[in-house]
Image (cartoon, helix red, strand yellow):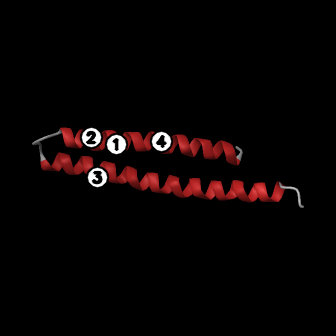
Amino acid sequence: MSTKDELRRVEEDLARLWAENQDIRDQLRDMGATDQVEKAAVISQADEQVELIAGLERRRDFLLARLEKEGEQGAPKA
């Protein structure tokens, strides 16, 4: 898989995870008065997704740097 393809896939995963995380947090707000254990579980799930998102963002940054480096290596010398 090329770096551009991997970057595209990572960006798609990030968009999906951010949307899912927002849905989870919206559900939490809509829960109203409910079991505190259930709320804690939902918050924990959202926090775990944020950790996954942070890892994907680091991967995206790495891939962007790699693409930039590849572009510099492939650029004609002046």
Give the number of the mark in front: 1 or 3. Answer: 1
Spatial separation of the CA atoms under disc 4 and disc 3: 20 Å
Query: Few, some or many C-alpha atoms within 10 Å of disc 3 (few <14, some 14-19, many ≥20)?
Result: few
Residue 15, label in figure:
4
The spot of residue 51 in percent (x, y) is 41, 56
Residue identified by numbered label 3: 44
Q: Where 72 falls versus 1 (above or below)?
A: below
Circle 1 sits in a helix, a strand or a loop, which is it? Answer: helix
Residue drawn at x 55%, y 44% as measured from the top left: 11
Classify mark 4: helix, strand or loop. Answer: helix
Given the current orientation, which residue lies at the most extreme left position? 33
Q: Is residue 6 above or below residue 75?
A: above
Q: What is the three-letter code of the residue carrying label 3?
A: Ser
Binning the other alpha carbons within 10 Å of mark 2 as few (below 14), some (14 to 19) or many (20 upward) gives: few
The mark nearer the N terminus, 1 or 3, is 1
Splitting the image into 4 quarters, where does residue 2 fall? top right
Secondary-structure class at tag 3: helix
Q: Are marks 4 and 3 in contact (CB under 8 Å)?
A: no
Which mark's residue is nearer the viewer, 4 or 3? 4
Q: Amino acid at mark 2?
A: Asp
Would you name the residue on which mark 2 appears? 26
Q: Which mark is residue 14?
A: none
**Image check: 25 left or right of 2?**
left
**In the displayed structure image, the side of residue 10 where residue 76 appears, left or right:** right
Q: Position of residue 73 (x, y in %)?
A: 81, 59
Residue kind at label 4, given as amino acid type: Ala
Q: Quadrant of the N terminus?
A: top right
Q: Is residue 13 left or right of residue 76?
A: left
**Marks 2 and 1 close (CB-CB < 8 Å):** yes
C-alpha distance separating marks 2 and 3: 14 Å
Q: Position of residue 56 (x, y in %)?
A: 51, 52
The residue singled out by tag 1 in the image is 22
